[in-house]
Structures are given as C-alpha cells and as structure tokens.
Image (cartoon, rainbow, N blue to C red):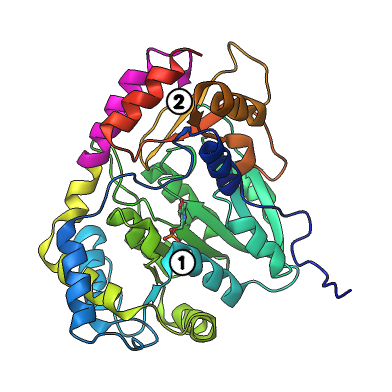
C-alpha cells in the first residue's frame, strides 16, 4: 500500500465542515459558517454574464485585470490615503485564503516564527506549519479580547519573522484601535518583522468606528501584506475572488509564488466586479447593512439565556453560556444542533490548544426571517 507522510498530521476536516454537515443532518438553521443566505446584487451577475458572453473567457494577466487593480488602487487612496501602484503592488487572488497562503509561502522558511492572536481564523496556523514555520500563539480572553502589547513583545525572538493581524476579527468581532496600531508601530520599529494584515471584513465596522488599515501607517505599510476579499464585500463568498496589497519588493516575491500557485484568477468575475464597483457605492453600504442585522440579532438574542459579547465589526456575534452551564463548547454546540436545530461554531476551535471559555460564535449574515427563526429556537434553551 502506498502511504505518504502527512504534512499536517492531526489535521481533520475543519470545524466549519463538521458543523455544517451536522446542521444538514439535523435540518438545523445554519448560523455556523460565515456566508450570507441571501443573494448578491443581480446587476453584478448581469455584468459577469455579459463579460462571459463578450468572450472574456481566457486567462487574465497573472496579476489580475488592470481595470480591477486600478479601482483597488483608487479605493486605497480614497479610504486610507495610501498609494499602491496597480502594476507592481496589487495582485488579484482566488479569495483571501489564497492571498494568505501565497504571502506566507513567499516569506516563511523552516524555523521562522509567526505570532498569531487567538482565537484565530483557522487558515493561518496550518499553512505556517506546512512551511516548517513555528506558530507562536498569543491567547486572548473574552469578553474584550484585548491585546497587551508588552506580552506580544515577550513573544519576540531572533527568529520572529511575522505577525498576523486580523481586524475586524473572525471569530470575536473585535477591531484594532488606533492605540493598538500605534503600539504595533513602536514594537516593530527597527526590526525586520513582517506583517500579514487580514482585512477581509474592513468594510463591516459598526457604531461609527473606523477600520484601522495598516495601509494608513507608513511604518507598517512598508512591512505589510494586506489581504482582502470580494466574497465578503459583494455577498458572494463562493466566487473566491480577493486580492493582496504589498510594497513592490514584497509583492515581487508574492507573485513568484502566485504564478505557480494559481497563475491567474478567473477573468469574467474580475471584469464583472470591476464594472460593478465603478458604479456602486457598496463600500459605503456594507457597514449600515450589517449593523442593522447585528442590532436585530442582538435584540432577539437578549431574550435568550446567553450573555452577548461586544461586536464592533465582521458578521459574527459571540455569546457566552458559562453562567448557566459548564459543558464544553463543542458539546454545547452539538447539543444545540441536535436538540434545538441551530448551528454555531464553538470558539475553542479557533485556539491551537482548544482553550474553552464556553463561547459560541453565530454568523448573522442571514435574512431577518432566518435570524428570527433561529432565535425562536434558542429561547427554548
Ligand atoms: C478572517 C478571514 N480571513 C480570510 C477569509 C477567507 O476569505 P475568502 O473567502 O475570500 O477566501 C475568511 C473567510 O471566512 C475570514 O473570515
């Protein structure tokens, strides 16, 4: 029998697949995985279909369609007063996930250490490990998941290669403040530490707060890859189109990997998205759109036994049940699917050591009726 030594021993199906499968088996309302249950704008679909009909069906340039890269450059300027050259500093990717994988692959060598903040999105650690890198997790705690930057400094060593940021954060819904960013500027000054800043929820920020992009801070911009996702922006997570931004020298290395990783991203999607974004004010609409959903969901959940954690951005609401049960969060999530028909994600899945604070994550990127039906079930708990 042929066997291959696993690059990721101990890795099984992601918690998202497990919970979604369980939700399907029990016909539960699925608030686990982070995707909308409503469709994107039909106009966007028309533009993409139009691009296909016009024959835009062959390979795009390796870095992506120039029209789309130019629009991204304009957006970065308008939102963050940051200049990224479309020819040399912006690459269209197959979703944020590929941008993360490619940036890490371009930079991480065996023995390099990468600091991540946990609970962390699940794509970072396996990729670092696959590359022979060492994950240095900093475990944050509910309810506010604040970062003590002195603690981050303690994780530094001569092998520290990169820090991964994610704001707005999945799963906690927390965002980095200007104070956080300034602390990071100070901490990385006179070092050659790189930053991978996962900003896929940059346009989903609530209560008048402002997203702090590393692009706004020249000291951070010069050492950062920024990851973004059109799936999140356009309610079309299944299309898997995103992009990466980085200063020219870093982007050069990124593209060396990208060209052998995917070469280029599908052409009609890029053309349709570029045409759509030229006319739409989606960037401005997204925060109020999801803030309304967050407010409705939080107000409905206030009738349940759960304690609500703060939610300043992203489309995830975390809740605690520690005051009424000491069940493990994985057991609680499964119990709620089987007995009440609502799927969530146990937040311990976002810690390498499966640290359990008895918190569940719900995705509220759903139609109002879905949220109402889910909470009708959750109040019975
Ligand atoms: C924090 C974070 N980063 C990256 C991604 C991946 O984005 P994409 O679906 O564009 O690959 C996700 C998707 O859920 C995410 O939550």
Structural distance between the alpha carbons of marks 2 and 1: 30 Å
Which residue in the protein does label 2 denote? Answer: 309
Q: What's drawn in magenta, residue-wise?
A: 288-309
Name the secondary structure under disc 1.
Answer: strand
Give the camera-side residue of 113 and 91. 91
- Asked if residue 297 lies in the magenta stretch, the reply is yes
Q: Earlier in the sequence, mark 2 or mark 1?
A: 1
Q: Position of residue 86 (x, y in %)?
A: 29, 80
- Asked if residue 15 lies in the magenta stretch, the reply is no
Image quadrant holding the N terminus, namely bottom right
Q: Magenta part mainly helix, strand or loop?
A: helix
Q: Quadrant of residue 317?
A: top left
The residue lying at 41 percent from left, 42 percent from top is: 175
Q: Position of residue 85 (x, y in %)?
A: 29, 79
User: In the picture provided, is 107 more to the left or to the right than 266?
Assistant: right
The residue lying at 74 percent from left, 62 percent from top is: 8
Q: Position of residue 124 (x, y in %)?
A: 59, 58
Residue 16 visible? The answer is yes
The residue lying at 27 percent from left, 77 percent from top is: 268
Q: Taking the image as four quarters, which one is ligand 1 found in?
A: bottom left
Say few, some or many: other residues with alpha carbon within 10 Å of mark 2 (under 14 / 14 to 19 / 20 or more).
some
Which residue in the protein does label 1 denote? Answer: 224
């Amino acid at each position: 029998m042929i066997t291959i030594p696993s690059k990721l021993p101990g890795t099984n199906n992601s918690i998202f697949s497990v919970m979604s499968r369980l939700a399907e088996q029990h016909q539960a309302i699925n608030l686990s995985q982070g995707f909308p249950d409503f469709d994107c704008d039909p106009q966007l679909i028309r533009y993409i279909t139009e691009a296909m009909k016009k024959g835009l069906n062959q390979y795009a340039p390796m870095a992506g369609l120039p029209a789309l890269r130019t629009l991204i450059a304009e957006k970065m300027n308008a939102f963050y007063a940051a200049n990224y050259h479309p020819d040399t500093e912006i690459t269209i990717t197959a979703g944020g996930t590929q941008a993360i994988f490619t940036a890490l692959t371009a930079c991480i060598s065996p023995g390099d250490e990468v600091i991540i903040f946990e609970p962390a999105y699940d794509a970072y650690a396996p990729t670092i490990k696959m590359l022979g890198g060492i994950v240095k997790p900093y475990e944050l705690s509910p309810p506010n998941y604040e970062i003590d930057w002195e603690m981050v400094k303690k994780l530094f060593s001569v092998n520290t290669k990169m820090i991964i940021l994610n704001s707005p954060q999945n799963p906690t819904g927390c965002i980095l403040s200007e104070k956080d960013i300034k602390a990071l500027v100070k901490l990385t000054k006179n070092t050659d530490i790189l930053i991978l800043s996962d900003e896929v929820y940059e346009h989903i920020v609530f209560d008048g707060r402002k997203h702090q992009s590393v692009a706004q801070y020249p000291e951070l911009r010069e050492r950062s890859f920024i990851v973004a996702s059109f799936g999140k922006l356009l309610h079309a997570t299944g299309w898997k189109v995103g992009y990466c931004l980085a200063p020219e020298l870093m982007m050069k290395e990124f593209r060396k990997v990208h060209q052998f990783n995917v070469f280029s991203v599908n052409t009609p999607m890029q053309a349709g998205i570029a045409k759509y974004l030229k006319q739409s004010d989606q960037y401005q609409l997204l925060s109020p759109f999801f803030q309304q959903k967050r407010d409705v969901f939080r107000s409905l959940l206030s009738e349940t036994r759960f304690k609500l954690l703060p939610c300043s951005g992203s489309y995830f609401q975390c809740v605690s049940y520690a005051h009424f049960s000491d069940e493990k969060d994985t057991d609680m999530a499964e119990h709620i699917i089987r007995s009440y028909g609502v799927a969530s994600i146990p937040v311990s899945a976002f810690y390498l050591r499966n640290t359990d604070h008895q918190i569940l994550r719900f995705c509220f990127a759903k139609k109002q009726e879905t949220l109402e039906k889910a909470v009708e079930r959750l109040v019975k708990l």
